[in-house]
Amino acid sequence: SSSSKARPPLFCREHLEEREELEHRAERCEKELAAADDKARAHLARERQLERDVHVLKMGEAHNEDCLASMTRLLSKAAADEVRLRETALMAQDEADWSRVQGSAVRRAL
């Protein structure tokens, strides 16, 4: 009977081996869970960065649209100014031509 007490019973050894295996599995699962958490945090950080990037791009797009509208207004004003200047130049040319015609007529009359 003393020899049976010196050796642990078979079911205890199996129980210990099973427990060790379960502990190893639990450790692996905890490591996998920690890695998955890290990946999720990195993914969330990347998603937030992309949202910020999209916001910056939209703000830039709105600014570009404002600039384009402003430049369109300036070009329209410049075109209108050019038309007015051409009309003014033509009127000045007409007046100069008329003055020469009148000057010739006055000289002929004298």
Image (tube, rainbow, N blue to C red):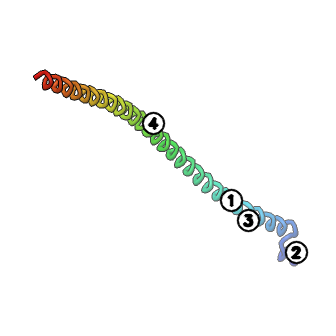
Q: Residue furthest left?
A: 110
Query: Which amino acid lies under the numbered mark 1 shown in the image of this protein?
Result: Glu
Earlier-in-chain disc, 2 versus 1: 2
Mark 1–mark 3 distance (CA, rounded to whole Å): 12 Å
From what the image shows, is residue 8 above or below residue 87? Answer: below
Find residue 27 and report its horizontal and vertical position in percent: 69, 62
Query: Which amino acid lies under the numbered mark 4 shown in the image of this protein?
Result: Glu
Question: Pointer 4: what residue?
Answer: 65
Q: Secondary structure at mark 2?
A: helix
In the rendered structure, find residue 24 and report the number of the disc placed on it. 3
**Quarter occupied by the N terminus:** bottom right
CB under 8 Å between discs 3 and 4? no
Residue mark closest to the camera, 4 vs 2 = 4
Q: Residue furthest top?
A: 109
Earlier-in-chain disc, 1 versus 4: 1
Q: Secondary structure at mark 3?
A: helix
Q: Which residue is found at the position 76% from the left and 66% from the top?
A: 20
Q: Secondary structure at mark 4?
A: helix
Earlier-in-chain disc, 4 versus 2: 2
Q: Which residue is found at the position 27% from the left and 28% from the top?
A: 88
Query: Which amino acid lies under the numbered mark 2 shown in the image of this protein?
Result: Ser
Question: Pointer 2: what residue?
Answer: 4
Mark 2–mark 1 distance (CA, rounded to whole Å): 42 Å
Residue mark closest to the camera, 1 vs 3 = 1
From the viewer's perspective, tell me whether residue 85 is left or right of residue 48. Answer: left
Mark 3–mark 2 distance (CA, rounded to whole Å): 30 Å
Question: Pointer 1: what residue?
Answer: 32
**Quarter occupied by the C terminus:** top left
Find residue 68 and report its horizontal and vertical position in percent: 43, 37
Q: Which residue is found at the position 15% from the left and 26% from the top?
A: 103
